[in-house]
Amino acid sequence: MLPVWAGLIAAATMGVAAATATTATATQDTFLVLGVQALGLQAHSGDRFATLRCDPPSGTHPHPESACRVLREAGGDSTKVVGQPGTLCPSVDDPVTAIASGDYQGRRVMFRHTYLNRCDLARHTGPIFEL
């Protein structure tokens, strides 16, 4: 069974992709649905979701300018984001899963990775998943 948050992200991105397919391809638009799901001790805090558009930075993301800048520096590849490498994080096992789905400059994006805790998430992804 697909978790509720995964279904919501999939539905949101498919609806947006269908509605803007010709526009996104023509203008190399960026539109991402981002999510962070708490799996461990803070699971009660709920899942967080945001939309992110770049060129110009907008959406429901609280820091669209910095998130778009970091994505641009990584060429839209979340696995190549530099993040905050000098950050020291506690070894507390409180996993969170980060999800990104949508289009980055006309290219399809699907990203899902589970991190040890929110600090580890921030260390690896910078402002992208600061929701």
Image: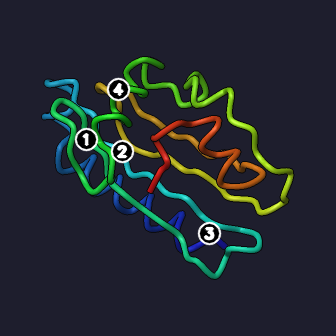
Quadrant of the image occupied by residue 2: bottom right
Cα separation between marks 1 and 2: 7 Å
N-term mark: 3 or 2: 3
Please name the residue that numbered disc 1 is placed on.
53
Between tags 2 and 4, which lies in front?
Answer: 4
Front tag of 3 and 2: 2
* Residue toward you, 96 or 33: 96
Which of the numbered marks, if any, corresponds to residue 69?
A: 4
Which residue is the site of mark 2? 32
- Choose the circle earlier in sequence order: 1 or 2: 2
Marks 3 & 2, CB-CB < 8 Å contact: no
Front residue of 43/7: it is: 43
Q: Earlier in the sequence, mark 1 or mark 3?
A: 3
Q: Quadrant of residue 82?
A: top right
The residue sitting at 24% across, 34% down in the picture is: 54
Mark 2: amino acid: Leu
Q: Amino acid at mark 1?
A: Arg
For the residues labelled 2 and 4, the Cα–Cα distance comes to: 14 Å
